[in-house]
Image (cartoon, grey):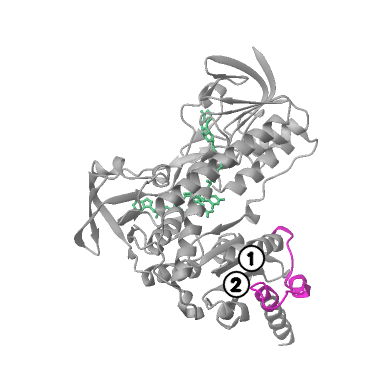
Amino acid sequence: MKQYDLVVIGAGPGGTPAAMMAARFGKKVLLIDKRGEPGGECLFEGCIPSKILENAANRYALLKEARSFHIDLDGAAQIHWEEVIADKDVLLEQRAQAALASFKVLPSLDFLAGETAFVDAHTIEVNGERYGFEHAIVATGASAHIPPLKGEGVSRAWTNADIFKAKELPEEIAFIGAGAISCELVQMFAKLGVKCHILERGPRILKRIDEEAALIVQKRMQEQGIEVLLNVGFDSIDGDEGDFTIRYTQEGAAKTLRVPHLLIATGRAANVEGIGLEKAGVEFDRHGIKVDGGMQSTVPHIYAVGDCAVGPKFAHWATYTAGVAIHNIYAPTRHEAQEEKLSWVLFSDPQIASAGLSEAEAAQKGLEVSVEKYDYAADARAQIDKDAEGFIKFVVETKSGVIKGVQVVSYDASSLAGEASLIVANAMTVLQVMGAIHPHPTLTEGFGKLAQSLFFKSMMNRRR
Ligand SMILES: Cc1cc2nc3c(=O)[nH]c(=O)nc-3n(C[C@H](O)[C@H](O)[C@H](O)COP(=O)(O)OP(=O)(O)OC[C@H]3O[C@@H](n4cnc5c(N)ncnc54)[C@H](O)[C@@H]3O)c2cc1C
Ligand SMILES: NC(=O)c1ccc[n+]([C@@H]2O[C@H](COP(=O)([O-])OP(=O)(O)OC[C@H]3O[C@@H](n4cnc5c(N)ncnc54)[C@H](O)[C@@H]3O)[C@@H](O)[C@H]2O)c1
């Protein structure tokens, strides 16, 4: 039986960097993926295809707005969906091939295509062969969680695994669940002229994030002609691709929606079944593999990173936790993943960026904080770009002046996420941010102005 220092199951944004880091240390590594190509859900059914389509939709929408910048375009803009999809497939394949090529320069890294499972705590099996290992990292990701709703239409609806393969642009589509996946996709389709409905059981969209930020996006959706249906109770979902009937109740009234296409995005389920975790003695539940702060499972030489572990579900978190696991396996010191410094961007319209704690999370932790906002309505750059809706919000620990959280809502919040992330990761104070010189006219000026306003407020409070 061939022996490896490290076996990594799953070649997504968690598994791939983990395997490459260990191989760079000269460790003998086996990386396995059942898809046959590296990239994971992020590359094939998640981050990258969704942003390619979003990019096409945004450019199309900009052309339509050209008149507000006094530009006339001859003829109507037209989107060629099939070409966008074909282009997407080319880019995905290029990225997978580039990753495979980068494996080839690491002689101690073997990549195997196949579905694998643990046989015991030191052995895995793939394609009928067994391999022994000293350490293992599980990075099998997550899949769409389909809730137990009534009707045969539930299992026939699209998930994120289907939608990016749609050969034609749908004329009408409904989304069930107003979380990150639906909210990004629904606005993209609406911008391309698709009639869209979004149905959510809760009282607002994006229930996990800052309410004020979510409500701006919710309002924009309505302005874009998206039907936003909240507090929905589902009775049944019948039909099949081409003709779905959704029966639901809203404010006590029974209603029906018929749509040709339906996507369900009601949360994620960690890929923990069928990989022999029981045989290896690794504990897990429906939320994922149980790990400690160092990404170590209940079996000390087996680690879990990314979406398959209990915790946040983002590509960059998967990569970050891969680094934490590799550190803890091979370095003499121990490192803990710092979830309170997590950052992310939602590619909605306007975009939302966040780093660290929201106001609600700070309250849950019992922190005494002051919260202050900079409104983009008066910002020079935002006015020049004629898109001044949004804000920067700082959540500041009152006693220390340390910025514990930053939320940004703006058409270009993704470009501001890096500064937000650095502020929180380095536990910067209001005074330190105020000391940075932010160039004019850019959307980053708001960071400096907000810090200045918080600083003067605290000075005034001290004088009183
Ligand atoms: C529509 C959508 C949009 C998203 N957009 C973003 C975004 O913009 N930014 C962001 O940060 N995150 C985004 N995400 C989340 C992101 O895709 C995930 O957090 C990320 O892919 C997790 O990486 P991972 O390595 O843990 O798992 P995955 O990327 O899921 O990779 C797991 C790999 O394991 C393999 N595997 C599973 N079981 C086995 C087995 N038994 N044997 C062998 N191989 C196996 C799979 O084939 C897969 O390749 C999005 C997700 C979706 C669905
Ligand atoms: N830009 C990004 O970083 C990005 C983009 C997309 C997805 N993601 C990741 O993928 C994760 C999953 O996204 P998601 O949208 O599937 O889940 P989610 O957890 O973000 O949202 C699910 C939504 O579905 C609703 N819901 C749940 N059960 C329901 C039911 N029975 N009926 C009606 N509504 C129901 C919930 O109330 C919630 O609003 C995100 O949390 C995020 O980590 C990230």
In terms of image quadrants, where is residue 135? top right
Give the SS element for disc 2.
Answer: strand
* Residue 446 image position (x, y, % from top left): 65, 75
Give the SS element for disc 1.
Answer: helix
Going 53% across and 24% down the picture, which residue do you hit?
A: 116
Q: Is residue 436 magenta?
A: yes
Going 37% across and 54% down the picture, which residue do you hit?
A: 177
Instruction: Identify whether 198 is placed above or below 278.
Output: below
What residue sits right under mark 2 in the picture? 392
- Residues marked 2 and 1 touching at CB (< 8 Å): yes
**Region rendered in magenta:** 425-449
Q: Judge from the rendering whether residue 14 lies leftward or rightward of residue 430; answer left or right.
A: left
Circle on res. 416:
1
Image quarter (top left, top right, bottom left or bottom right) of the N terminus: top right
* Residue 89 image position (x, y, % from top left): 49, 43
Circle on res. 462:
none
N-terminal of the two: label 2 or label 1? 2
* Residue 435 image position (x, y, % from top left): 78, 74
Q: Amino acid at mark 1?
A: Leu
Q: Amino acid at mark 2?
A: Ile
Going 43% across and 48% down the picture, which residue do you hit?
A: 267
